[in-house]
Every structure is written in C-alpha cells, then in structure tokens.
Image (cartoon, grey):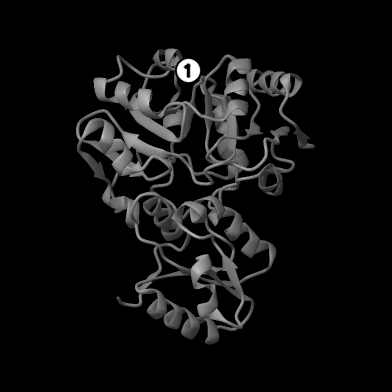
Amino acid sequence: MNTKMVIPCAASFEEAAQLINMGEVVGFPTETVYGLGADATNEEAVKKIFRAKGRPGDNPLIVHIASLSDIHNVIYGEMPEWAQKLAEAYWPGPLTMIFDKGENIPSAVTAGLDSVAVRIPGNTDAQALIRAARKPIAAPSANLSGRPSPTTAKHVFEDMNGRIPLIIDGGESDVGLESTVLDVRTLPVKVLRPGGVTPKMIADVVGEVEVAGSVMRPLKEGETVLSPGMKYKHYAPEGSLVIVKGAAEKVAHAIIDMYDATEGEKCILALEGNLSLYEGRNVFSLGKNPEEMAHRLFDALREMDARGINAIFSEAVDAEGIGLAVMNRLGRAAAFHIVDAGE
C-alpha cells in the first residue's frame, strides 16, 4: 500500500471521507495530536485501526463527532446536566467525556465496555473531515502502539507509511498532548487521563472533581481500562527514560551523576531555565514552562529516537495544571521509573 499525503482542502476532505465510508483508515490532524480515524459504526473498519497500530484490543478508542447534536447517535440516553455544562464550556476542544454506550457503536470501539468516550475536536480540519464523512469517527493517536504520539503529519508517515492509504497534513498540533478523559456518568466526575483541560478548569464548571489514582501509577491488576492511555506502557522512546524530581539543583546533580555513569548515546531533557546546570553535556530544551513542555514533549521523544539516543534523563515538573498531564505522559513513557532527588 502506498500512503498518500495531502493538504487540507475540500477535495482532500472528500477523498478522505470516501475512504472512511469504504471502511478504510486515514490519518488526520486534531488540536491535541494526530488521529487514526475510521467509521465508528463499522466494526471491521475499526479493527483495521487496531491492526495498523498493533494496538491491543482491550484498549478503547475515542469517538469524534462534529457537533453536540450528533451525540445521540453515539451515547445511550441523555447527557447528564453537568456534562452539558462541561460541553458548553470546553467543546469543541481537548476534552473527552465518557457516557453509557449507544447501540450504534460496536464493541470493538469500546473494548467490550458498556461505556463510550466522546469528543468534539476543536481543529477545523478534523471537523471538516467528520462532516464530509457524515459519520462519527473512532480514532486513537496515529502512531504505532507504545510509541510517542504524533504531533505532525511527518510523525504519522514515519509510523504508518504502507499501513494506511492517506494522511491529511494539517501542520503541527496546537496542544501537543492527547485530550483530557473524564468519566461523567456519575458525580463527582473523575479524570482518567489528564490533558489540556485541567482538573481546576473542570472544577470551575461542576465543583468537585476526582483524579484517578492510575494517572500517576501503573494500572493495578483487575482495574478496568475505561480510557485510552491507562493500561499499557505508552508514548515511549526507543531508549531508556528516567525521570528525576525534586529541587532544581538536586535534580541536576542526580541527573549528572547518572548521565556521567552511562555509556553510549545519551541526552538530558530540561526546562530552558535549567540548561546551564548541565554545562558540557548533551541537553535538549523542553521549553520555558509546563505549557511549552506539553507542546514539545512528544516531538522531543521522537527526536531522541532520530538521534539514536539510548539513555534519556528528564527533569520532572510539578503535577499541577497542565503539569499533571506532562507527568502522566512522561511517567508512562518511563514505565514510572521516577527518582526522587529530594527538596
């Protein structure tokens, strides 16, 4: 199969929509990361997503719709009042909400669960594709399973060339991390995967909000996988990754000790203000603050692979605001190998 790259325009949206309606899978941009989309009502098409990614079948997908009026084709019953308020506040945008599953959605999408994850993307190209297809689109991130998520069409091509027929190149993703996943079926609502819509932003709308314990630890045996990004090692570079938390100078000392004791190609991931602490060593800037770190993280991990880095040492950030999402992704990429250097 030859994978075609196209720019966003009416003709390319129509071409991609035709492929989706034929049961094929296409790569497309969203404001979070690039998605690998298929008709969410076509079980055989959805199975092609899992085959293209090498994704385990017990890892549910997110269903993308173009407008709130489409949600009744996807969920069972009515949206709870609090979910309506969240939709008014943050849709379209990087928030996924979990509802009871409607009968139009096959079990392959939901990993056999009676719940379904739904989002209205804020990216205009994603919305144009969904409208052209006239179908809800099931889509995980458009990378090989376990690899860092793609924030450019080039990243998608690296992983999916020969596996899917078409990729829409909509430029770089705005957010750079996947959406927040929120279970809204009961109160208090619960964050299952942190993202660009932070717990505080959610609490501002609905009051109390819980954060699942699995956000900052591996899933325990017997815990149900309600959201993508909960169970498996995700977002991982090819080299080893260690995260170091604590006071900046103590973190730097700990990283330098590990770096200097490690053979082979190695690199340090650090905030821009701390680069001088690692003088004379191979350092890659993740930006000035957690927001920039969120935007650059997956690109940085892919850059480590491109450079042949076999050992990566990363500074941690405070797990507050968008920092919670950054630490969740870093933690899963490192299989939660986190060293505490002290305060």
Q: Say which residue label 1 marks.
A: 67
Which quadrant would residue 4 be assigned to in this image? top right
Q: Please state, as top left, top right, bottom left or bottom right, where the N terminus lies in the image.
A: top right
- How crowded pointer 1 is (Cα within 10 Å; few <14, some 14-19, many 20+) is rated as some
Whether residue 112 is visible to the viewer of this picture, yes or no, is no
Which amino acid type is shown beneath numbered disc 1? Answer: Ser
The residue under the point 53% across, 56% down is: 297
Q: Of residues 329 and 18, which is closer to you in this image?
A: 329
Which quadrant would residue 71 be assigned to in this image? top left
Residue 251: give x, y in percent of width and height.
Answer: 41, 76
Count of numbered circles on the image: 1
At mark 1, the secondary structure is loop
Q: Of residues 81 and 321, which is closer to you in this image?
A: 321
Q: Of residues 30 and 99, which is closer to you in this image?
A: 30
183 w.r.t. 13: above or below: below
Residue 191: give x, y in percent of width and height.
Answer: 31, 41
**Is 86 on the left or on the right of 303, as rendered?**
left
